[in-house]
Amino acid sequence: MPARINYRYYPFIATQKEFPNLFIEKPSVLVPGNSVLRDKTIEVFKTIVENGEVPVEAFSDHDESILVYNTILDIVKFINDKRIANRVALAYAKTASKALNEEKNEVLVAIASKLGLKVKFDASNFPKIPLVVTEQRSVRVLFTTCPFSLPIQEYIMIVTPRLMHDQSYALINHVVTGGRVFLDRNTFKRLLEEHIYYSILLQIERTEPPSTPDFVELVEGVKSTITSYQEKLINKSIFLELEPGRESLDSIEKIVVEELFPPCIKKIVDLINTGGNPSHLERFNLAAFLGYIGLDVDDIIEYFRKTPDFNEKIARYQVEHILGMRGGRKKYKPYNCENLKASNICPISGQCPGGKNPIAVYKYNIRRTLSRKKKRGGDQVEKSEEAAGGI
Ligand code: SF4
């Protein structure tokens, strides 16, 4: 019996073949002419952009969800803003991921197959891999089964953009046999979420929005939401000039000059500024770095405000944790250069001068800039020369 899929949560897998009635006319032509669907689309789009989640409860059935989803794809393509596209794709992927927690294995397989993955599910509980669980007074070894498998190429394709920084996704940490990578349910679900995100971005890229007056009017209806979201991002960016006369090395930890960030940190900041979606490790290292050079929680959060899945409550909790204001009260440092290279976060092949970690390199860049500036008698900092982080 085919798996029962609730399309309210997964409208991105609905095809014209399965729902011919919904696609008689292009949804983005049909929806703007129907006042109920048009208002619902505006409301759903607003919630996605402002809160980063899809209000599934707003849909009375899966037809509505599919029609609104396809209309939103066209709106996003029409607007042509990478940040909005990422935010919409992530909101749908995260909402789907939550729903997947409650789904049976066959539903996970059905959704993955509909998105083009050659997934296999083997209920024979093979292979089993040992998992060492350390508790307060004991160490236990549990055996976890890996019933899902993907061809190696598909696994690498999904993992490479964002998950490759995390060693737990390295092939060496998985059972690989017969050209397939075997995965437990949680890992497979995480990969599926990632694949959903990229599939939606691809759907946005491929869709062709109509130019009917009703559709253009609908886009006008969501413009205020987009404008206020964009304004929030622009007004909050942090940039402090290297102040003349601030030569005391004691104050170096409180100087923020993005141009002098080492290339690894600058790469993450640039990724966020261009609407990209950094990995967890990149986010951790950026927050730890900014905390160590003296930024407070609010300032650090402003950097993350531009990420497509930004949620202030979650971001604040995580930044406070990294800064040692919660949990074990330990203030985390960014990784050292060796680990940043092993995690593929370091973008250069050699070593930056000044030290073996980004903080030391940043301090070195500042010292060098200040002493050059002193020599030149207070000339302007040559920003372009320093932008390469001393390489
Ligand atoms: S060498 Fe170290 S500081 Fe320089 S870019 Fe690589 S990780 Fe960053």
Image: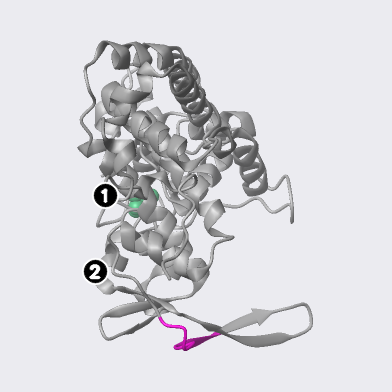
Of circles 2 and 1, the one toward us is: 1
Residue located beneath label 1 in the image: 17
Q: Secondary structure at mark 2?
A: helix
User: Percent x, y for residue 342?
Assistant: 37, 64
| Residue 81 position by quadrant | top left
Horizontal side of 125 relative to 34 (left or right) equals right
User: What segment is highlighted magenta in the picture?
Assistant: 122-130
Say above or below: 391 vs 351: above
What predominant SS class does the magenta segment belong to? loop
The quadrant the C terminus occupies is top left
What crowding class fits label 2: few (fewer than 14 Cα within 10 Å), some (14-19), or many (20 or more)?
Answer: few
Of callouts 2 and 1, which one flags the residue occurring earlier in the amino acid sequence?
A: 1
Residue located beneath label 2 in the image: 153
The magenta stretch spans residue 66: no
Q: Is residue 287 visible?
A: yes
What crowding class fits label 1: few (fewer than 14 Cα within 10 Å), some (14-19), or many (20 or more)?
Answer: few
User: Percent x, y for residue 177?
Assistant: 31, 86
Say above or below: 176 vs 71: below
Say above or below: 140 vs 287: below
Q: Look at 72% across and 44% down and name the residue there.
A: 325
Q: Look at 78% across and 77% down and name the residue there.
A: 136
